Amino acid sequence: MDWIIGAVCAFIVAGAAYAKKSLTLSGCLAAVLMGTIYYGAGNLFWFGTLLLFFITSTLLSKYRKERKQELEKSYAKTGNRDAGQVFANGGMGMLLCLGYWIFPHPAWIYAFIGVMATVTSDTWATELGSLSRKPPRSVVSWRVLTPGASGGVSLLGTTAAAIGGALIGAGAFFFSWIADFETLGFLSWTCVGLVGGLAGAFADSYLGATVQLMYRCTECGREVEVSEHCGHKTVRARGWTWMSNDLVNVLSSVIGGCVAIGLGIILAL
């Protein structure tokens, strides 16, 4: 019965997102599959946390969208998410949910919150950090970067990342209480989300500044994540050819999840 409930709920949420053009068709289908597994193999704890990430991130992608339209042309992924981005953001959490279903252990739960806090922190930092009045700085060299540049951080973006991660942690406490998970208290869960999310978000920025594949626009000279910009093909600027934006998201999620496991175990003692 849980699998049917999950499929129906996932279809409703993903269908609404597709109608609002927040998801492409492939993204919608991926979200339905993912939501079904989150609820069927898990429960409201897993599904609710996924929804908390998806709904808040979708709303932020629409916030002052007109001011972010030019910057979005430089990003590999925008607010209209396809299957690749859906799995990059939620696929790791889905595997952790299946892991807990097969072999229940608190480590799966801590890792899940770290992963979801990471993708939330990263998304919030991108969506709100791009509105900063001050230009971002490189997380590696601290030199000033153009707005939207990969590997850049700002005070507004970092603050948004912290709030996003803490929100996932607070949500974890709420959903664990409903699902009757006897794990951590409110402050502990919030701390796990905050620290795990920030660790993952900064790992994402570091990978973006060092090894992520980046291109340069031959028309405007800007360093971008896309293979076409200003109506022209871009040329490779730096990074490893196989290190895509989606892979950076996955690796940073793993880092955030590992940090959350360590912190969760310590706080549970």
Image (cartoon, helix red, strand yellow):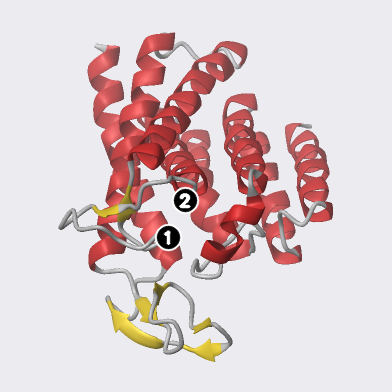
- Residue highlighted by disc 2: 130
Residue 75 is left or right of residue 156, and the answer is: right
Amino acid found under the numbered disc labelled 1: Gly
Tell me the quadrant of the picture where the C terminus can be found. Answer: top left
Relative image position of residue 64 (x, y in whole percent): 63, 46
Q: Is 14 located above or below residue 97 in the figure? A: below
Q: Is residue 160 visible?
A: yes
Q: Position of residue 108 (x, y in %)?
A: 40, 33
203, above or below 144, in the image: above
Q: Where is residue 169 in the image (x, y as percent from the top left)?
A: 45, 23
Could you tell me the amino acid type at mark 2? Answer: Ser
Where residue 122 sits: x, y (%)?
43, 46
Q: Residue at x 54, y 45 (%)?
A: 94
- 24 displayed left or right of 182: right
Q: How crowded is mark 1: few (under 14 residues within 10 Å), some or many (20 or more)?
A: many
When asked about the image quadrant of residue 132, the answer is top left
Question: 158 or 109: which is nearer to us?
Answer: 158
Query: Residue placed at 50% from the left, 22% from the top?
Result: 172
Instruction: Please tell me which residue is depicted at 38% across the width and 32% down the height of the picture.
Output: 159
Secondary structure state at the residue bearing disc 2: loop
Quarter of the view holding residue 144? bottom left
Label 1 sits on a secondary structure element that is loop
For residue 241, above or below residue 210: below
The span from disc 1 to disc 2 (Cα, nearest Å) is 6 Å
Is residue 108 in sight in this rendering? Answer: no
- As drawn, the residue found furthest toward the left would be 141
Q: Do the residues labelled 1 and 2 touch (CB within 8 Å)?
A: yes
Where does the N terminus fall, quadrant-wise?
A: top right
Q: Which mark is residue 148?
A: 1
Between discs 1 and 2, the one toward the N terminus? 2
